[in-house]
Amino acid sequence: MELKIDNTFTTKLPADPITGNTRRQVENACFSYVTPRIPSAPSLLHVSIEMANELGLSEDDVHTKRFLSMVTGANVLEDTSPYAMCYGGHQFGNWAGQLGDGRAINLTEITHRNKRWAIQLKGAGETPYSRTADGLAVLRSSIREHLCSEAMYHLGVPTTRSLSLSLSGDQVLRDVLYDGNADYEKGAIVCRVAPSFIRFGSFEIFASRQDSETLKTLVDYTIEQFYPQYEGGTKENYLGFFNEVVQNTLDMIIHWQRVGFVHGVMNTDNMSILGLTIDYGPYGWLEGYDPEWTPNTTDRQHKRYRFGNQPQIGLWNLLQLANALYPLIDEAAPLEAILQTYHTEYPKKYMAMMREKLGLQLAVETDIQLIADLEKNLQASETDMTIFFRNLTQVSKEGAKDAEDAFFAFAKAAFYTPEEITGIIRSDWEAWFLAYRERLSQEHLTDEERKTQMNAINPKYVLRNYISQLVIDKADKGNYELLNEIHTLLKNPYDEQPAYEHWFAKRPEWARHKVGCSMLSCSS
């Protein structure tokens, strides 16, 4: 097993001079050296072979003892010095001060085929940033992160990746819903990878401490490694870098809205400077289309991070990043102008995305009302977002003109309570289908061409919340067959996959209020 080690984070950025693993405030440093906790009986549960190949590892490599030792923290690779990153963040809109990698330990960076990858373990033990926690992770949350990272990648959503999922052999005490009912669960470790795990909060912490020197060092490093077109250290280059981050973040959130993904905890310490989806905690997928839904029990009262508010939160978080970068630019107006582009570009990009979901290539002024009416109808009675859009290809612009036939041809499969579709709800739907069919008649694509285009943008399979829970329940009993099946299913989310047709189904009623299916905490 050969990896091309190329550490830049630890060689180009200032380190915490204290090497003891004690909880502390870390000043004037981007990271602290730490050593992963040695697991008592590590065992490998699942590996993403595709991701392993991206790192230059073969299928034979991932079955070696050396690989197991690396991805569980049992042994430290030669010529590497694991570390935890220092950062701060705004949590639920409030400045939280220093946070840092509380249960993540970065092993090293490698390069392969002109790509850089940082390798990180989640759940491998305490760091100076663990605060009152133990730095460990449980099987439940680790399965969710492993599956979702790879599911998002195959959906075409910018994301960090997951290389492997392992058991530590240890028992970990957790209170799933923070209600005082703690219990022991199986300990697990996810080996996750990304070009970098630098976050908005990585810059905020130094700005909050008025440490402009370290802030500049980190910004220059980030630009050199990941935005080299903006090297030079000038005000214009820093603004160009910020503009790029704004666009990457906006594009990522548009993808979230496209597939019905709800991050659940969009704190600034959970926002990647590269525009990648990062930190899969209390996330969820829209089943019934509901802009007000959030899976995070911590956010139940105010629903700050609800599905429909994610674009606005993205902008708010970028504002905090702008504030952090201000000391290097010393001028508010150009930062505000860049933020304004997010504000003006979002509705345009959202409309373009929705047109794609509806199979519309032309931009027609009435599309705004068509989409607004659709969103209203989807909420009038609980309607499965994934099934609705996937089945929408069945509407033919050249078929029968009877709205009722078009309506029942596919829509019924998406309604959770079809008996509610009466009266004004039904008439609104019929009016919408007539308007949609009329709109399709303005398009040049044939029905078959449109179906191909729509099926490439509307997934048939997503990691529904109840599916994750079924995998967890099986795995908790030592059965990992479903884990393998779901991982395989989600590698081709846009394909029909008839062998897995049973997963193209609405959430079962038993999962409506089940913990893990509709309610999750930040420890999830």
Image: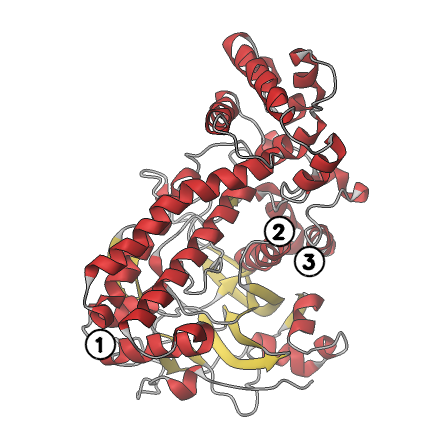
Query: Which one is in front, 407 or 339?
Result: 339
Vertical placement of residue 232 versus 302, above or below: below
Task: Give the labeled residue for mark 1.
Answer: 212
Q: Quadrant of the N terminus?
A: bottom right
Task: Give the labeled residue for mark 2.
Answer: 155
Q: Give the label on residue 29, or none.
A: none
Task: Give the labeled residue for mark 3.
Answer: 478
Vertical placement of residue 161 versus 2, above or below: above
Disc 2 on helix, strand or loop?
helix
First of labels 3, 2 by sequence position = 2
Q: Please state which amino acid type lies under the numbered disc 3.
A: Gly
Q: Please state which amino acid type lies under the numbered disc 2.
A: Leu
Residue 261's spot in the image, x, y percent?
51, 45
Identify the residue at image location x=21%, y=76%.
Answer: 211
- How far apart, in angstroms, are the residues tagged by discs 2 and 1? 39 Å
Query: Which one is in front, 183 or 92?
Result: 92
Which image quarter: residue 228?
Answer: bottom left
Residue 474's spot in the image, x, y percent?
67, 51
Vertical placement of residue 162 versus 256, above or below: below
Which image quarter: residue 127?
Answer: bottom left
**134 horizontally vs 51: left or right:** left
Identify the residue at image location x=35%, y=50%.
Answer: 341
- How far apart, in angstroms, are the residues tagged by discs 3 and 2? 29 Å
Q: Please state which amino acid type lies under the numbered disc 1.
A: Ser
Residue 279 in sight here: yes
Disc 3 on helix, strand or loop?
loop
Residue farthest to the top, as pictured? 423
**472 horizontally vs 99: left or right:** right
Label 1 neighbourhood size at 10 Å, few (<14), some (14-19), many (20+)? some
First of labels 3, 1 by sequence position = 1
Residue 84's spot in the image, x, y percent?
41, 76
Which image quarter: residue 190?
Answer: bottom right
